[in-house]
Image: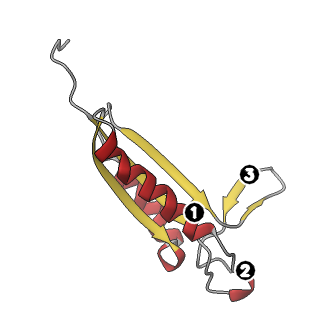
Amino acid sequence: NSTAPAGPADVWLVAIGVSRYRASAYDLRFAAKDAQDLAATYRALADRDPRYGEVHVLDLTDTGGTRDAIRGARAWLQRSRPQDLAVVFAAGHGMVDAGRNYFFGTHDID
């Protein structure tokens, strides 16, 4: 066991916000804005709070919020360390199937 003081924790934020869908009938007003606002809040942490080091943001808003991109976020998050803070935020449409399993409505939902 190390007795050395731990360095500051990095923040890893996956910011998913889909306001603009391929099928425009699903469009929302504020989902992407909410994800971007949360990212800005976490970015400001590095300047205000010495407990946090670098802030890493994966911006998956609007056309970036596809099924493949969201699935790829897992590999991106694996770059974090055990002492880091990982946050996944999702805003957009969602649905529940008959088994009460939740599914997020990606930009490319049909």
Q: Amino acid at mark 1?
A: Asp
Kindly tell me whether residue 14 is visible in this rendering. no
Asked whether disc 1 touches disc 3, contact meaning CB atoms under 8 Å apart, the reply is no
Which is nearer the eye, 87 or 55?
55
Q: Amino acid at mark 3?
A: Asn
Q: Is residue 93 above or below residue 98?
A: below
Quarter of the image holding residue 27? bottom right
Q: Is residue 12 above or below residue 82?
A: below
Write the residue at 32% across / 54% down. 56
- Number of marks present in the image shown: 3
Label 1: state its secondary structure. Answer: helix
Label 2 vs label 3: CA separation? 21 Å
Which is nearer the eye, 33 or 78?
33
Write the residue at 30% across / 32% down. 51
Image position of 103 (left or right of 59): right
Q: Which residue is mark 1?
A: 34
Of mark 1 and mark 2, the one earlier in the sequence is 2
Depth-wise, is mark 1 or mark 2 nearer the camera?
1
Return the x and y of residue 24 as percentages of the image width and height: 69, 87
Residue 26: mark: 2
Q: Is residue 71 above or below residue 9?
A: below
